[in-house]
Image (cartoon, coloured by chain):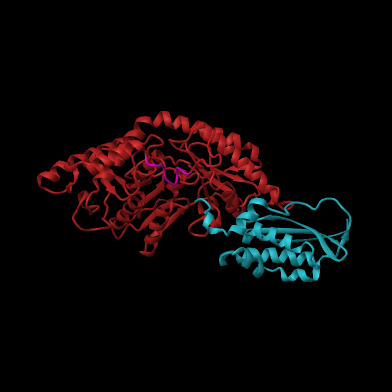
Amino acid sequence: MSAAPGDPPVYLDYAATAPLDARVAAVMAECLSDPGLQANPSSAHAAGRAAAPRVERARAEVAALVNAPPESIVFTSGATESVNLAVLGAARASGAANRHIVTSRVEHRAGIDACRQLEREGFAVTWLQPSTEGRIEAGQVMEALRPETALVTLMHANNETGVLTDLHAIAALCDARGVPLHADAAQSAGKVPIDVAASGVAMLSFCAHKLGGPKGVGALYLRRRPRPAVQPLQFGGGHERGLRSGTLALHQLAGFGAACAIAGATLAEEGARIRALRERLWLALAGAAPLWRNGAREPSVPGILSVGFAGMEGESLLLEIDGRIDASSGSACNSASGEPSYVLRALGLSDEAIQGSLRLSLGRGTTAEEIDCAAKILVQAVARLRTALPPGALERIA
Amino acid sequence: MSAGRLRYSPRVLELFRTLPGAGALPAGTGEVVTGEAVALDRGAWVRFEARLEGGRVADCRFRAFGCPHTLAAAALAASKMVASVPADAPAIDARLLARELEVPAEKLGRLLVVEDAIRALLAERPRVQ
């Protein structure tokens, strides 16, 4: 049993980042130590030409995860950069007549802040409101589209609730209106099947570190035909077909490629296993009732469970489990911004209910034993803190 | 993100882990007073219950909803009130609790809720249990 005194805590924060897979680390170490892979892969000399194929192998591995042609992949420093490149780059390239963006209130900060920047630049942004289950429906997008819409940008899977957006339906609507659709797939790539060719998305952002790859590397898929117009955000060398200048970090890219290959090869099996573990956790947490689930159970990515405990204050709950479970809270005191989770607020939760919510996210390393252990710890933690609650607080703080 | 141990003083951690004085007063005789302050917009709800005997606080218990600093401050305040005479209790204020617990400035608003609950307790007429 994990999380006994002296044991490492149960890690349930895979949605924040996944531990580096040992097989990925081995690939990266090989790249760092191989004398034949030390040159700049963009250099024309022999050493550079020797390194370049390793980059293209990684590109092919990354592309294969989302069924994209390798040449449609632009490497970046991570999903945040990919989202910024897609949103800012496509909007700024769209021309003076197209100054409208459609997005939602539950995007990751990367998307929210990029759209706010566009508002400062004079774009109008339509912020779609999710349902209480966290869904953005295709009909909402259809109603929001205008003749001057330059871009629709939405998360594929929400990072707090795990709820999936129906990209196929929304992409079909966008295509019919000639509007590019960008999807932030940081939480879904490698977790659920993604086929960019079939889905019709114009752009898709994802990264390595959510898949057991290294931090600091990501990708933006850009559809080839019709190719969305995108302006670069940085300049200096014209790497990545002019869209993302900067010397390519071969070991990072090789690690990303390896992580994608592993995730792709085990996606169905791991998805089913992790989904079953998530439901096992939810059932085991019944001992901490009254509690609720934030966001729809399905469709969702397998590994995210957002759960609220009545009468709980998030910071106290996190401290109560500190050192035994690593998880994330949507409470005011623990968010970097100092504000309650805007995602859960958009779902209609009160600030008190948000404070009592935890995001428990599972991944490749999660075991059934860990889930049982984590559930036991959480049930005990909630019970102890509830013993100190004022009369009536359990009913009122939910 | 995870709660970081470094954000809490050792005294806060000790009180949070043990919650001395949490719960209801045990059954007994004497005068009982209660005081409560609710400020969910500040993330705190604190209730004190004290038994008075011979003009002194014979026992004091608390119940609270809030962050670790709030719970620790309520526990510390309850312990300080035991054996005190009610007239001295106003000295147990947010400033004193913040100093003893090394509470960061951004949490002082929550300690004021603890202070408000103490004042509410002192303002209540004693009732015989």
Please tell me in which quadrant of the rendered image residue B46 appears: bottom right
At x 66%, y 69%, the residue is B96
Chain B, colour shown: cyan
- Provide the residue span drawn in magenta: A13-20
Image position of B1 with respect to B92: above or below:
above
Q: Is residue A39 left or right of residue B5?
A: left
Q: Which chain is red?
A: A
Please say whether residue A19 is one of the residues in the magenta stretch. yes
Q: Quadrant of the N terminus of chain A?
A: top right
Number of numbered discs present?
A: 0
**Residue A186 coordinates in the image, percent (x, y):** 39, 45
Name the residue at the front extreme.
A6
**Magenta span main SS:** loop
Q: Nearer the viewer, residue A146 or B34?
A: B34
Name the residue at the left extreme.
A45
At x 38%, y 49%, the residue is A153
**Residue A82 coordinates in the image, percent (x, y):** 33, 50
**Residue A68 coordinates in the image, percent (x, y):** 28, 37
Q: Nearer the viewer, residue B36 or A202?
A: B36
- Whether residue A196 is visible here, answered yes or no, is no
Q: Is residue A96 left or right of residue B19?
A: left
**Residue B117 coordinates in the image, percent (x, y):** 73, 63
- Whether residue A146 is visible here, answered yes or no, is yes
Q: Nearer the viewer, residue B120 or B96?
A: B96
Q: Is residue B54 left or right of residue A188?
A: right
Q: Nearer the viewer, residue A215 or A205?
A: A215
